Amino acid sequence: MWLLSTDRAELRFFVSPDRVPGGYAILSHVWGENEQSFQDVQGFRTRGAQSGENPRDLVSSKIRECCLLAERHGYRWVWNDTCCIDKTSSAEVSEAINSMYLYYTLAEVCYAYLQDVPSNAAIERPVRVPDKPMILGSKAKLAELVQDITRIPPAVLRKEMELEDFSIARRMSWAAARETTQVEDEAYCLLGIFGINLPTLYGEGRQAFRRLQEEMMRQSIDPSLFAWGLRADYDGLSRALLDGESTDTVHHNHNVREVYLLAASPSDFENSADILFTPPRASGGEGKLVSEVAQEEKPDRPSMQDVGIPSFSVTPYGVHARVPVFEGLGYIVAPLFCSTSDKQTIRLLLSPCTDASDPKRPLDHCAGMFSTEATFTPEWRDVFITHRPPNTTNAALRIPINNTLSTPFRFPKLEIQRILTNRLRFVSLTPTTGPWNGTPPIAFTFKHFRKENWDSQVHTGRTYASIPAIPRVTSPNTLVRLTTFGNGPS
């Protein structure tokens, strides 16, 4: 790792963070628009060698003040992610990202620079802090305030409890509101708190977060990884399944992320702050919580002591899960061995995927997640669950029109994308009739999959003739039809 000397702001390489004489300080901050890089700091060193200036006087005020603060506290070295990583080297970037949690863990002190917090007013007022930093307090002293913002328990901040004492879902919820400049960093910033190492591939987008979850499946037995999204109290549904009563069909389609087992981003865990991992105890039953909150024993609860915890593994076909299930009315109910803080058991509701390509291996979608006190007599079974959307690289909407500028009519790509991002799925394209003497009109039919109001306008041709606004949608699965007319005779 590269470290800055606090007396001159010059970079020096150390083989390992635990081999820095006297230890080092570290800076935590939000990046600004004009942060100085590794190359900038090296350039100041060269300039100082020629002019006799101290490079510390040439760096930005943020770097300089951090060096001065660490020096006053007796540290010779400090680490800052803006200038202590050579970002021209992809290998060094990947190593730093995978080691960053270790860097912070082994630092003697961490300075959190809050640029928008005032030094002379209440902490909540968002005003710019002066160039000269003022100490507002320690992490231990402000632990309750930090919890209000991040939902990280004070016991973790004060190192009274280990991260592993909390379920995967709960740890994910701490990052649900975090915003990153690069979408991939939503995943990479979580590597440390889950003890995961991943190659960094900037440009892969949200695939980074899916890769993180797949690696967590390989290394953890905690199925709360799948306890994300909105959760309902489905005790009525539970009783209906047990009694064999009829229930409403659970609709799903491939364009809705909730039908897949893996989350799309940490924000999907916003409502998972109360999820607790409840593995079976050696004495039987759904057992003791990792956070030491025990679930009450129930005499009619089936024992899991002979079969252990569900297992999940990624295959090209879907996630292969070995789980205890209850089946009824075409649905599969699978307990996740998780519960809420009020001791409600979390279960997945699975429904068959009608597009499964292998008739010998039924494939299921996630039809919902619910909490309940109802009990089931499960049967252990191997099931396959769709875990992520299909590859859409070549799945662009295909419309049989000429793409040249001399076409009778055309849809700009941005207009098509705007339609598709509003929960509309293309259904059909059919010739139609209308009061028009030019190119025969064509009707585009879309299906809407969410109950919401939606208005749009589609432009056609170089003259951008307007299509009337789509009528307001009042229920799911509403068919919406657009009719296009050419801008001149054929």
Image (spheres, helix red, strand yellow):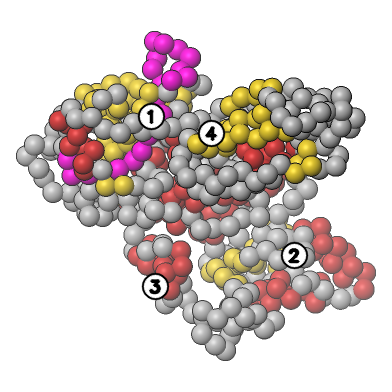
- Graded by Cα atoms within 10 Å as few (under 14), some (14 to 19) or many (20 or more), the crowding at tag 1 reads many
* Residues marked 3 and 2 touching at CB (< 8 Å): no
**311 or 347, nearer to the observer:** 347
**223 in magenta:** no
* Residues marked 4 and 3 touching at CB (< 8 Å): no
Residue 39 screen position, x and y as percent: 81, 58
Q: Which residues are magenta?
A: 354-374
Seen from this angle, which residue lies furthest left? Answer: 299
Label 2 SS: loop
**Which residue, given by chain and number where applicable, does mark 3 sit on?**
144
**280 or 422, nearer to the observer:** 422
* Residues marked 4 and 1 touching at CB (< 8 Å): no
- Graded by Cα atoms within 10 Å as few (under 14), some (14 to 19) or many (20 or more), the crowding at tag 3 reads some
Marking on residue 404: none
Label 4 SS: strand
Residue 401 screen position, x and y as percent: 78, 25
The C terminus lies in quadrant: top right
Residue 2 screen position, x and y as percent: 69, 57
Q: Please indicate whether residue 43 sits to the left or right of residue 86 in the image.
A: right
**Which residue, given by chain and number where applicable, does mark 4 sit on?**
479
Residue under the image location 61 percent in, 55 percent down: 180
**Which residue, given by chain and number where applicable, does mark 1 sit on?**
312
Q: Please indicate whether residue 36 sits to the left or right of residue 267 in the image.
A: right
Label 3 SS: helix
Marking on residue 33: 2
The N terminus lies in quadrant: bottom right
